[in-house]
Image (cartoon, rainbow, N blue to C red):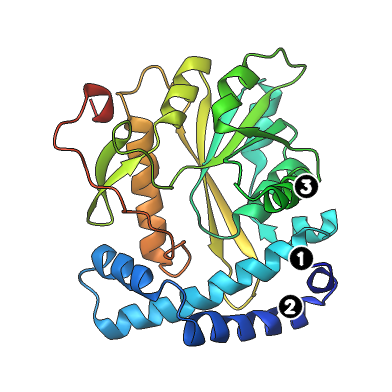
Amino acid sequence: MNQISRLSWENAFRLSDFLCWSVFRVVKYRKKVIFENLRNSFPEKSEAELHCIAHDFYRHFTDLIVETIKFRTATPQCVRERIEGDIGMMEKYYDSKTNIIYLMGHRGNWELANLFSSLCFTHECIVVYRPLQNQASDQWFHELRTRFGAKLVSMDNIFKELQKPRDKPYVVVLANDQSPNPKTAFWTQFLHQETGVFRGVETIARRYNLTVLYADFSKVANKRGYYHVEICTITDKPKEVPNNAILETQLRILQRDIENQPHNWLWSHRRWKHKRPEILKPEQLLR
């Protein structure tokens, strides 16, 4: 990995092209999962259209691999330059001493987004993660994600962490589009499918009265490895909105953004591996 991190960006993307060919054309990594996800999410598209999306996704996927390795040693200036967009609202929230929960989906390069947040936000940056079983990999990502001062906290410990006294406002950063436990998830329609969503965001926002923001990271056309961030406010009054309305709003925005740039999402993930239970508890519904 050290050798890859020292490559120029031009040569890093040449390596990505080779990986794209070997991983998806030769090994055919998760091809069945990718096409099942695409067909279910875009039933109106032809097979030719789906193959175009898949082809672009393959390149995006291997770009993420080499970019992430590069960001392990990239300079702060390089990280700042790779994301464009207006983040001025974050300073306004900081000046008003507003604590924030900052949601993302698996669009763009989320490792870059984490680094960008810890570099460019004045808030204390708390990144929520799920520890990896492989200790070496977990340590590598821990060092990556904390290299510019972010605090890495597992989801199991986030409530305890937010109870600690602080000298300045904080922002909790997390991606919230993984596949959750179906027995505790919020269930809704997403990309034409019954979809479960982690409810932790709702609980955290309500308990600590956090303003909820959503950030989308789209790929900049004809600028490989560059992204554009668009931040919007879901709610600044989380205790006053209906149960699971935060999650519902997040998914509607995420679906819109996926439809606008469909190759820019993690289609290789088994997002819909769980089925909706026949009977749901009240807290699992929008109400």
Residue 19 image position (x, y, % from top left): 61, 81
The outermost residue toward the left is: 278
Determine whether label 1 and label 2 are within 8 Å by CB.
yes
Q: Which residue is mark 3?
A: 143
Q: Would you identify the image quadrant in which residue 73 lies?
A: bottom right
The residue at which mark 1 appears reads as: 70
Numbered mark located on residue 107 in the image: none
Name the quadrant containing residue 200. top left
**Mark sitting earlier along the chain (1/2):** 2
Please state if 166 lies on the left or on the right of 187 as rendered. Answer: right
Does 126 sit left or right of 260 as displayed?
Answer: right
Q: Are marks 1 and 3 in contact (CB under 8 Å)?
A: no
Q: Earlier in the sequence, mark 3 or mark 2?
A: 2
Residue 13 in the image: x percent, y percent? Answer: 69, 79
Front residue of this view, candidates 2 and 37: 2
Position of the N terminus, as image quadrant, is bottom right
Badge 3 amino acid = Glu
Check residue 12 in the rendering and tell me which mark sits there, or answer none.
2
* Residue at the image point whose x is 39% and y is 31% from the top: 199
Q: Nearer the viewer, residue 178 or 109?
A: 178
Residue at position x 80%, y 61% in the image = 78
